[in-house]
Amino acid sequence: MTRWIFISDLQLKPDEPEHEERRRLLVERVAAERPDFVIDGGDHVAGQVNDEPEEARRVAQMWAAYHRVTAPLQRVCPVIHTVGNHDQTGSPPTSDEYLRQTGRRGRRTYFPQTIGGVHMAIIDTTNGRHRAGFADHEQARWLRRDLRAARQARCTVVVGHYPVLVAPWLLDHSILRDEEPGSQGLLLPMLLEAGVDLLLCGHLHAYERTRFGTVTQIMTSASDMAIDDMAKPGEYRVAFDKRQTYVRFALEDSTVRCEAVTADGEIIDSWTQELLPKPR
């Protein structure tokens, strides 16, 4: 059995002890479960939207807070990182500091990783500061090859900070915003064709499980400041909650068992998913 946990949107910032304490408690609960690995869905820090001279100093403080809060995770298992819009800093905005802080200096923001029968494609769904998109054709070619490649993994997971499936009034927060309105866009058909089981995302500061065809999208957040419009039901929504959450998964044979858990330990959603056949 392989067990992993998905967290997102810690958005650590300096000089806010209460904010940091709430995230620390959630992370300690996650670490106590001793998973085989943890995926962080992005927005590790609350990078500034301005380009004032003090930004570099504040960003350094934010990353120090992130490493301080997530130290319990680093001690028990690998942590796999996904770039979020608030992780982009500087003028012009880049992911350079994010890559340095997550041990990938000079490398791409998207990459594959396989652990314990779970294949992960970590993608970059940012398009400049605080915009969503999947318009990078090089990344698209890489992802198509990766998802089509033969592998021994039983479960295929794609992780990107921005969601794909959102209610129409939240389209600006979806990676479909840079694609043809009313279409399935570029990414979703690739996921369906490749038999991707799970699409993990964050960004909207809420827990949501949605389903389109054979793909289940899971959104979670260590923040509890959901966008108000998220309370409206989306077309593909199965479950929703505005509290701080993380999601745990257990892979056994051809099945993955999933539970969404609040920072207080309450299970608010659970389901079992049969895995799809993978390309060979």
Image (cartoon, rainbow, N blue to C red):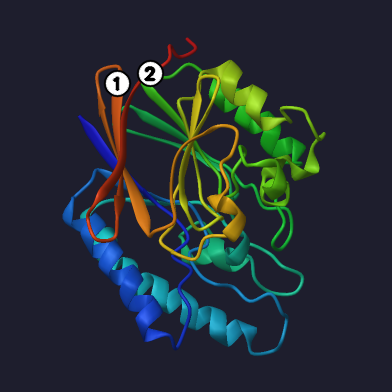
| Circles 2, 1 touching at the beta carbon (< 8 Å) | yes
- Nearest to the observer: residue 47 or residue 240: 240
Residue 179: mark in rendering? none
Q: Position of residue 269 (x, y in %)?
A: 32, 40
Mark 2 / mark 1, whichever is N-terminal? 1
Residue that sits furthest to the right in the current view: 180
Which residue is label 1 attached to?
255
In which image quadrant can residue 147 be found? top right
> How many badges with numbers are in the image?
2
Q: Quadrant of the N terminus?
A: top left
On the image, numbered disc 2 is attached to which residue?
A: 275
Relative image position of residue 67 (x, y in whole percent): 37, 71
Quadrant housing residue 25: bottom left
In the image, what residue type sits under mark 2? Answer: Leu
Residue 24 shows in the view: yes
Where disc 2 sits, the SS reads loop
Q: Residue furthest front?
A: 232
> What residue sits 29% from the left and 60% below the top?
263
